Image (spheres, rainbow, N blue to C red):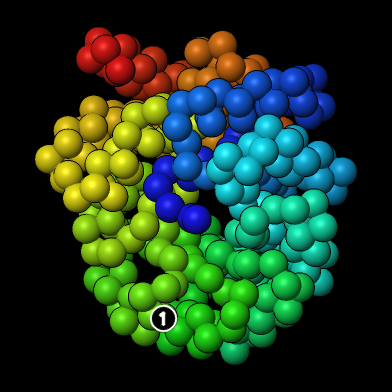
Amino acid sequence: MFYGSITALVTPFHDNSLDESAFREFVRWQLAQGTHGLVPGGTTGEAPVLSAAERRRIIEICLEESGGKAPVIAGAGSNVTAKSCTMAAEAKELGADAVLVAAPYYNKPSQEGLYAHFAAIADIGIPVILYNVPGRTVVEISVDTMARLAQLEMIIGVKDATADMGRIADQRMQCGADFILLSGDDFSAPGFAAYGGQGCISVTANVAPRLCAQLHNALRAGDFSTARTINEALQPLHRALFADASPAPAKYALSHMGKMRDELRLPMTCANEAAQQAVREALALLEGRGQ
């Protein structure tokens, strides 16, 4: 159910308010382009600056538009366990297929604290995908802790943004063959798949959903030659979308494509000129390839 190109959806704004019509059209476009899954209200969607009502609304819209055509994994990360539990409960009530929960940031909990945090969220009764991104959260979910968590029925997988290929095999061996391994890094997605990963929760898929879906279709089919060709075409865009703090370059790209306004909420600001130029050049290269 959770595989392939899963888009970490950006959240469109208009005059600092949620742009519901743009978001609805954006989700429709993603599905039409072949996206395999959707993540509303994650960190790429500027979750920390969304109100509770806005977060609920984007999950509702995503579910309405997906209509069961693709799984919806709602963002439910916080450094307050009670808040994550509340968000998970709401996602369950709305009908989301799972929640994506990052390790608590700033607090720097111990491995035992991490286990207790995720176990409490699992008790809500909705499938939980862990998000291990130590570059953002400072703390890392160890493989041993992940293996303990994998024994809980509702802990079903991980979005791994460590870029550590060796870790994938360790997670596979310790967490079991049914534990879902998703890359959290577009750069490493092909290698991740080669080591046994099932897909990627992707930033690039916001901008190039069809190519990202084709990439993961090829990876799932074991056609690494085709996957390599597609990934090489996407590589300049992968780099451009992180030429400034994400999701600023992605929003600039989407505004350039006419999908939404180039608007973020503080403390995030629009992409700088160098990043904008990199995005324009990457889009032009894809257009030149007929993509």
Task: Please state which of residues 23 and 180 is positioned toward the viewer in this rendering.
Answer: 180
Task: Please state which of residues 73 and 246 is positioned toward the viewer in this rendering.
Answer: 73
Q: Which residue is drawn at 55% across and 23% down?
A: 29
Look at mark 1 in the image and give the residue it sits on: 175
Residue 88 appears anywhere in the view:
yes
Q: How many labels does the image show?
A: 1
Q: What amino acid type should be assigned to the residue bearing mark 1? A: Cys
Disc 1 residue crowd, few under 14, some 14–19, many 20+, Cα 10 Å: many
Above or below residue 23? Residue 85 is below
Q: Which residue is drawn at 62% across and 48% down?
A: 72
Helix, strand, or loop for circle 1?
helix
Q: Among all residues in the image, which is located at the extreme front?
A: 68
Q: Among all residues in the image, which is located at the extreme left?
A: 225
237 sits to left or right of 6: left
Q: Where is residue 248 in the image (x, y as percent from the top left)?
A: 55, 31
Residue 62 occupies which quadrant of the picture? top right
Residue 191 occupies which quadrant of the picture? bottom left
4 sits to left or right of 20: left
Residue 77 occupies which quadrant of the picture? bottom right
